[in-house]
Amino acid sequence: MADYKEIISAYQNLPGGLIEAYHAIQKEYSYIPEDAVVAAAQAFDISKARAYGVATFYSYLKVGKRGKNVIRICESAPCHVAGADKVVAALEKELGIKMGETTPDGKFTLEFTECVGQCQATPVITINSKPYGDVTAETITGILAGYK
Amino acid sequence: MAEEMRIVLRNYGKIDPLKIDDYINVGGYQSLAKARSISQAEVIDVVKSSGLRGRGGAGFNAGMKWSFSYGTPADQKYVVCNADEGEPGTYKDRIIMENDPHAVIEGMAICGYAIGATKGYIYCRGEYPYVVDILNEAIAQAKAKGVLGDFDVEVRMGAGAYVCGEETALLESIEGSRGEPRFKPPFPGVAGLWGKPTVVNNVETFANIAIILEKGADWFKGIGASNYPGTKVFTLTGDVVNKTVYELPTNASIRDVVFGMGGGVAGGKKFKAVQIGGTSGGFIPESMLDTPVDFDSMNAIGATLGSGAVFVMDETVDLVDVVERITKFFEHESCGKCTPCREGTKRMHEILKKINSGKGTTQDIALSERLGQVMTRACLCGLGQAAPSPVLTTLKNFRPDYNAKLG
């Protein structure tokens, strides 16, 4: 795994590159370590408060540990009426955790998200940003098998 | 019934988006060469007189927007493509960028020449990393071919903030800050990215530019509604037979979209409502389905064309429940900068939750109506101003649904 300090330094001279740096860190770690926010503040020569403020403003970015595979369930209106709640129940049952939690083995985290722009196939979930459409309680097990 | 007309999606399914030669073979980048052979003012005049209005939701004349940046002297100017498609129910920009990225890039380069900018940014939402890959590949190929000349394009990723679809919030985000909207004026055309004159247009707007340069302003002006010429790309979702993307001339009616292209309500059920323009759009009842979809006609019925999202709901859908979900969305997406939105979206969600749980009173309905009117007028940016629209339009068009829930 690449050191977050190396990742940050690659973006340090890019105008407005802080968010790009966060994306790159998250791609590597699946989240942004708290210490990486402090390192980013130093590298971009801004206050820790500002670096933290940016990282936490954006819901796609997550400061603090989460699982290797991040499953996000869309709860925007089109997915809501298509039965997103049933998908939530199926995922919670399959993984034995509640929304917002991570499995004890650190493999999966369950999160809500707003629209991910795949509304031709509601309800939609994403796993590590890869979208899966027309998800049902029945298809969940098959989808997750590829990540176990 | 209106027929589909593909202008923006002219190359959809016909070219390999990852092969620039495919795009060039169908006439790609000839409009950029043509633009560069005439004066900047002439290019702006073509776009202005074509009547093309912004496809992101605000409907401002694109050529007019360009003229503000053209007329503002600066050592650097910027062209920014708004690809932060976050409006629930909308996936048109993804379809355009996945299938014809060069049409967007060419449109941006033409704008760059017209206003005197050598740098462009595509701000693509973080939820589309696969689209970012396509865009980066297309840009690399365009640079290798040398078709862009001195115009440089860079992709920046959004990170899941709906408010960044607002152009000044988007600029803040490119600058690496929290995506909070700026006070206007100054408008971005005069002082935008890093304080420099900046044109911010939507993906679909840029995808219209090359073909307008190729076929002329009069050709474009003759298509669709005279006050909002051209086509609009619609993305269908919800309880509709064909949940897919369609491009229709703007003089089509809502009925054409839902029952023509969309094939009507799925499962043989009855139509209840359609919400157009995204989650901030108005809820439209059956009696208004013959309204033309153009920007001004939609505004006249208290709805919006917005992003062109078409969310169809059948007779079994609990509208109050859907509206409660939408108010939760806005509470979550409010950036918190201005009080009417930060507090208003929170209170609106509380009221709708109360009504939806069967504990609401007529006073709660009156309160939500009043709060909505205040937010429409007092919020700083489009997010807060449009947030009450689903509440207000359902109260107006579907009041019995609320009355049935009162405690």
Image: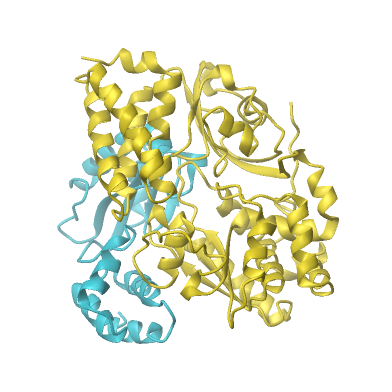
Residue B106 falls left or right of residue B177: right
Q: Is residue B204 above or below residue B146?
A: above
Residue B105 falls left or right of residue A10: right
Q: Is residue B235 above or below residue B173?
A: above
Q: Position of residue B184 (x, y in %)?
A: 46, 59
> Residue drawn 27% across and 35% down?
B349
Residue A73 falls left or right of residue B79: left
Q: Quadrant of residue B178?
A: bottom left
Residue toward you, B374 or B116: B374
Q: Quadrant of residue B363?
A: top left
Picture colour scheme: by chain
Residue B227 falls left or right of residue B264: right
Q: Position of residue A94 (x, y in %)?
A: 24, 44
Q: Position of residue B116 (x, y in %)?
A: 67, 76
Residue pushed farthest left?
A104
Quadrant containing the N terminus of chain B in the rendered view: top right
Q: How many discs mark residues in the rendered view?
A: 0
Q: Is residue B266 above or below residue A91?
A: above
Q: Colour of chain A?
A: cyan
Q: Position of residue B192 (x, y in %)?
A: 50, 69
Q: Which chain appears yellow? A: B
Residue toward you, B85 or A135: B85
> Residue drawn 54% across and 17% down?
B268
Residue B9 seen in the figure? yes
Residue A137 seen in the figure? no
Quadrant containing the C terminus of chain B in the rendered view: top left
